[in-house]
Image (spheres, helix red, strand yellow):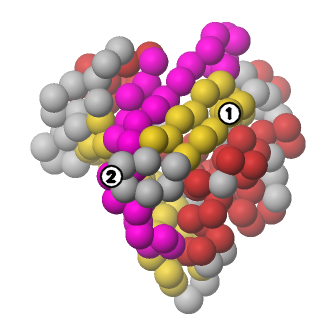
Amino acid sequence: MATSKVTPDADAIVSEIHIAAPPERVFEGLVDLRQVVQWWGEIGVYRCTEFQCDLRVGGKWRSAGLDGQGHIFEIAGECLEVDPPRLLVLSWVATWTGSAKTMVRWELEATSQGTLVRICHSGFAAHPELAASYQGWPRMLGWLQALLERGETVDDRKPVSAS
């Protein structure tokens, strides 16, 4: 089960989950275009249908898909730090937030049973109105865990309305 908290300065949302897979496998799940579209989303919530990543410092990345109402969304940015399989830091600009730029930091720490995944989405002190739209990180981490541990994809999940 993923945890999530807002930092005391209200600048970041930090979420964590343990995944029973080695860091190399988790990192691959975060950046491989075939895998990202398999885990990132849930019918009735939103679904990533396209993913691209030029995995190098300064490289561009992009995710696009459909929200729960069938509207197109896009998230894009630049790779700021790349240290496989330990660290991935991305700038983040989403269509639903206008031109506001935030930052997402993925830290992967090897444990005796797999990987502790920590995501820190920061930059909300400059855009406090956006923080509420990013409370879904624990669910998203659960989707990644479901793919890596059980092979569960977006298509395998029951739609939200069936829950």
Residue 74 vs residue 142: left or right? left
Residue occupying the far right of the picture: 156
Which sits earlier in the primary sequence, circle 1 or circle 2?
Answer: 1
Magenta span dominant secondary structure:
strand
Give the extent of the magenta segment: 66-95
Q: Which x, y percent locates residue 133?
A: 41, 25
Quarter of the rendering occupied by the C terminus = top right
- Identify which residue is drawn at 52% across, 49% down: 54
Residue 149, can we see it?
yes
Q: Which residue is mark 1?
A: 50
Q: Which x, y percent locates residue 158?
A: 82, 35
Residue 90, can we see it?
no
Residue 71 drawn in magenta: yes
Determine which of the numbered discs, if any, sits on residue 80 in the image: 2
Q: Amino acid at mark 1?
A: Glu
Q: Which x, y percent locates residue 160?
A: 73, 27
Q: Amino acid at mark 2?
A: Leu
**Foreground: 136 or 144?**
144
In the picture shown, does residue 112 fall above or below 86? below
